[in-house]
Image (spheres, rainbow, N blue to C red):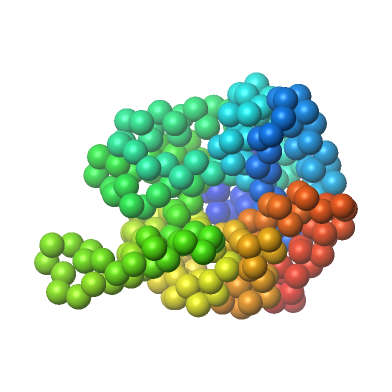
Amino acid sequence: MRRNSQKPFKDRILQSSHSKRSRIVLAIDVSDGAPTELTDRATDLLEQTRQSICAVKFGRQTVVSIGPERTTKLLRKIHRSGLATIIDDKLNDIDETNAAITRVYHNLGFDAITINPFTGWKGGLDTTFQLAHERGMGLLALVYMSHSGASEGYGQKVFSNPGSKKPRLEFEIFAERAVKWKADGAIVGATQPNIVRRAKEILGTSVPIFSPGVGTQGGEIRRSRKAGTDYFIIGRSITTAKNPGKVTEEFAKASVVLDN
């Protein structure tokens, strides 16, 4: 899939989704163990699930734990299976630092990276968007997280600018930024279908929604899909299962039921 890097990330993952008949992104977040052991574990998960997923997401802890060389080898295996790859780093720094990190992940072989809209545009994420899109890399904006404490930040009301007369919900502002900045996706937790629905109203069809939180955290594919989720990022419900392949196949079927 990396060979098609000139095609926008949104188109590449959609192509993979159609091919695999799945809207499932497997989250491989291994970190507790020796590098070779963790790499073998990640490879085994890929082999068991690759027919029922459209992409693989690595947490930053995975890359740090197994190292750059093993990461690149794993990404090549994933790409040979026709799958897209995402690194979950939640970029949240000044432009120079964000751009440097983006270059590293691109060179390792990732197709997309998560970013935090809280950082702002000028001197924050402007350079990152330019750099990533020049290199065919997608950017996924963190709009609302899946854990129970997310409301303390993403759900709080704020004044969006000094001239504002009425406070607004933070996640709505982040969703608007995702559209304005031409993000390739938005992260919105499946644990909050009402938030997914409201985010979809803002994002429309231009920015697909990627939802973590299914299963272990209490999110449900059916409710989140009806609310507007396009892709589901699922980790522990698959990676800790006795039969990851079977579980993933069931998730995949549920994820495309509204497509039929």
Judge from the rendering whether residue 220 lies leftward or rightward of residue 252; answer left or right.
left
Q: Is residue 109 above or below residue 149?
A: above
The single residue placed furthest to the top in the displayed view is 69
Quadrant placement of the C terminus: bottom right
Which one is nearer the viewer's eye here, 242 or 40? Answer: 242
Q: Is residue 18 above or below residue 60?
A: below
In the image: residue 209, left or right of residue 34? left
At 53% from the left edge and 48% from the top edge, which residue is drawn?
8
Quarter of the image where one finds residue 219: bottom right
* Residue 195 rendering spot, x and y as whole percentages: 48, 73
Depth check, front residue: 90 or 151: 151
- The relative height of residue 226 versus residue 80 in the rendered view (above or below) is below
Left or right for 247, reference 203:
right
Residue 165 at what x, y percent from top left? 15, 74
Q: Quadrant of residue 66?
A: top right
Return the x and y of residue 122 as percentages of the image width and height: 24, 44
Residue 167 x, y percent position in the rendering:
23, 72
Residue 58 in sight from this viewpoint: yes
Going by the image, does 110 lie left or right of 56? left
Q: Is residue 179 visible?
A: no
Residue plotted at (76% across, 54% down): 238
Quadrant for the N terminus, please.
Answer: top right
**Above/below status of 6 relative to 189:** above
